[in-house]
Amino acid sequence: MGTVLWVQPLGAPARPQGQRPAREANAQGRAFYFTRAEYTSYGRRRFGSWAVDFPKADRQFLIGLRHLTNIDAYELENPVRLDDPDLRRFPFLYALEVGYMSLTEPEVAGLRDYLLAGGFLVIDDFWGTRQWANFEAEMRRVLPEYDIVDIPVDHALLSAFYHIDEILQVPGRGGGVNGRPTWQYDGYVPALRGIFDQHGRLMVVINWNTDLGDAWEWAEDPWYPLQFSNFAYQLGINMILYGMSH
Amino acid sequence: MFEGLFQFLFKYRPVVFERGELAFDAPWPIALVLLAGAAAALPAVVIYTRPQARLRTPDRALLAGLRLAVLGILVFCLARPMLVIATVVPQQNFLGILIDDSRSMQIADEGEQPRSEFIHETFGPEGSELVAALGDRFKLRFFRFSETVQRLGDVGELTFTGRRTDLARALDAARRELAAVPLAGLVLITDGADNADAPLTEILLQLAAGRVPVHTVGLGAQRFAKDIALERVATPRTVLQGSSVAVDLTVAHSGFGGETVRLTVEDAGRIVSAQDVRLPGEGETAPVRVHFTANEVGPRLFRFRAAAQPGEAVSQNNVLEALVFVDSGERKILYFEGEPRFEVKFVRRAIADDENLRVVVLQRTAENKFYRIGVDDPSELAGGFPKVREELFRYDGLILGSVEASFFTHDQLGMITEFVGQRGGGLLALGGRHAFARGGYAGTPLAEALPIVLDSDASSDGGSFFAEVKVGLTPYGRGHPVTQLAEDVESSEARWKELPELSMLNPLREVKPGASTLLTGRAADLSDPLVVLAHQRYGRGRAMAFPVQDSWLWQMHADIPVDDMTHETFWRQLLRWLVSGVTDRVAVTSSLDRVERGAPVTITAEVSDSGYIRLNGAEVVANVTTPGGLEREVPMEWTVERDGEYRASFLAEEDGLYEVRVQAQQAGVPLGSAESYVQAGDLQTEYFDAEMRASLLERIADETGGRFYTPATIGTLPEDVSFTESGTTVHEERDLWDMPVLFLMLVGLIAAEWGYRRQRGLA
């Protein structure tokens, strides 16, 4: 798990609806904004779970994304509340620490509309069966008619830019070095799962028992294992390019 | 009235003066008459030229003139003027009477009686003064004509059921039939509603050269008091299944100005569209665009019908039909995107359920790295954007996203232009940071094909232009099939007003002279609207510009309901229209989609090689399947006029649908095949443009030396026909010296002289 940089009160929305960080002048008309979902959470006494690793992970990942692809991506973070109508202006959405997610009804409605309209959600950084159960329960509220299924390794998602033939468990900072485990809680095996709509279109990609965000955030740290940060960038880029074309 | 007055004053009808020649037959030598006249005039001249105190010079001149005029008339009469006119010898000449036997003669446009009633009354068994008068002078030969011409023994044989009126053929047949006998002329009794498309000039010249006057008798009203007619229907020959079809109709009327009529479209008896049309003022036609969806596959005969109104002269002209081939085939479109953009995802999503469209995506994701989606096999587009014609021309359409011109070689840019111009493919250029002038396309070969003017200065703004525009329809776009977002035009227009703003990076303001703009965009800080959607025909294909970069907002924006289909509808219609007219290497068209039974059908095929270079040496055969299922092979010949064009004809002798399948091969190697369809049957042609055409009938009479009559004026026909130079004739002399007008002039001149002298105190 990473560092929380953006503080919000327990169980409360991050900001009142409609108030968004002022964008820089060059932010207009860009092809891609790395949009982070602001959502209501519980169980974290002091911090909102949506803002874990924020904004360093976002910015650092965007540097890699812009360097490795020709995507016209806005250079800075772009957090948007799930109940903000503006959410639908950003068809790619990243959410993490969903093991603590506790969505309000407006957020459920906002996320549901977002996904059914064509939005693409990537879930990251939650571990173990308890957090899974919480996330699964929350997603049932959002998309009760769709099941969560495994994404096979031959899925087009894994070859959209890089060819990935194995799902690695990406540890949080400090994990995976000097004999430390890569897992947390009982999340020993990483999983790549998804939710498909009735047409077979992938709406949600779920990275469980893995922490891509930490790998992005600490990619420049010489102590962070290169193989995991490489993998995290590769999978992250694949998810974005797939989400922008499928 | 005029003619009666003329005859009272001049003793004879105008036709006698038209046909006769003036001559003099004085009982004395003409010199003696002139000398006597001069002698009588001399005293008057001498008296009036001598100066007299009581007469001023103008008085003398006027009185001398009056006196000389009186003497002149007397001298004219003494010279015994006369008209010499050729008239037929009774019963020595033939007169051909041609009677229109077509359906339009059943129209009752003047009173309750059909036009044919005049025929029955005049030429029926009871007889008439006209026939008696003609019979006294001529040997009469009757003909009936419509699309054919036959000798007519009895008027009772007329059925008035002919499907067409061919005046040229009728006149020619009668002329040939009566060529061996002394022919005084032809009488053409018809409404003049010729619909054979046969030129009249040649036969009229022949008749004029043979001095055979054609007297025309026009039946019917020159303008219906009350009628509604569908005059024209313009449909695409081929559409993709499920496409929205826009059809332009012209509704003409008389007597229904300001009223509303129901216009329906039927497909095999099922109404697929209906709308109310408000008719314009008298003498104006209403252009109407109707929309419907073509769902049934194959050749479909669509019927357009304006509901019949009470009191209409003709109800059959309220219906028009058009044959449209609804294609279930798949059109393949290459979407080349220069960078990852959400347009790719949402365009693919919009047409995902469209079985007639398939979009293959080639997306550049990094320098020299491409992501292919939807390819048929691993080799397709493996080398990136196509480098040879064969590779590119396998697609029906091409979408160019945000990709700079410098990515392409000069040859590739030329090849894309040829893809549109020669292959006939559809090109759609999208907006973006590397598109249009911003992408360096100004001055490239591709700029020629695009419908917009690329201002090279636009790229010098540092790429900073950004505008969020509210998209709106132009008057042209209002009725275009691409921009129809709802069932009717009004609902569609309302929907456009609700759509959220889109962003643009390409400030395009001007379209080329032959291009059309469907959508424009307005922004608060821009004085002029920007071009949002425009198209033009370039060579054989279509080129479109859609310089926005996030049309996906019409799907994703919070104002758009999740289940809204606007984005899908727009993109499907846009891409279907873009590629709907794209043909394969072998393409075939027929001269007409509907013909009358028995009419010839010309089929034209275009044959190309894999690079869409036209081939002249191919073996091309048309297999024509008749409605009865018989198959006939018709070889097609190269026309020589155009490369790759082959032509053949056949007669559509049965009612029903003819299928024409053209197959081409070269040196035994198949090049491809294509189909076309022709519907033969009763086109009800006689009921369209069925008003009496007086101008045409007057022209026929004028050019051959005849006269034009109506039933009201036909009484003088027998005498008029008698004055002819053709046939066996004699020359009659008709005195003019006793014309009342001369007597009246004499009295008038003398009275004027007396009155003037009295007024001047000379009497």
Image (spheres, rainbow, N blue to C red):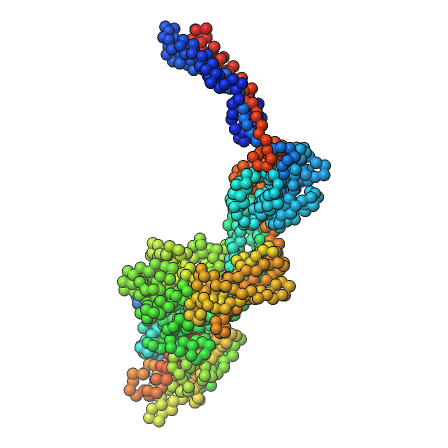
Residue under the point 54% across and 49% down: B198
Q: Quadrant of the C terminus of chain A?
A: bottom left
Give coordinates of residue B637: x percent, y percent. Answer: 50, 63
Give coordinates of residue B145: x percent, y percent. Answer: 62, 46
Residue nearest the observer in this picture, B570 or B426: B426
- Give left or right: position of B704 versus B466: right
Residue nearest the observer in this picture, B596 or A176: B596
Residue under the point 63% across and 49% down: B162
| Residue at the outermost right position | B126
Residue under the point 45% across and 66% down: B616
Residue under the point 56% across and 35% down: B725
- Give left or right: position of B460 versus B114: left
Give coordinates of residue A84: x percent, y percent. Answer: 42, 68
Q: Quadrant of the N terminus of chain A?
A: bottom left
Q: Quadrant of residue B402?
A: bottom left
Q: Quadrant of residue B224?
A: top right
Residue A163 seen in this snapshot: yes
- Please determine whether, in this image, residue B250 is positioned above or below residue B401: above
| Residue at the outermost front position | B29
Residue nearest the observer in this picture, B652 or B627: B652
Residue A102 seen in this snapshot: no
Give coordinates of residue B501: x percent, y percent. Answer: 40, 61
- Please determine whether, in this image, residue B589 is positioned above or below residue B71: below
Q: How many marks?
A: 0
Q: Quadrant of residue A171?
A: bottom left
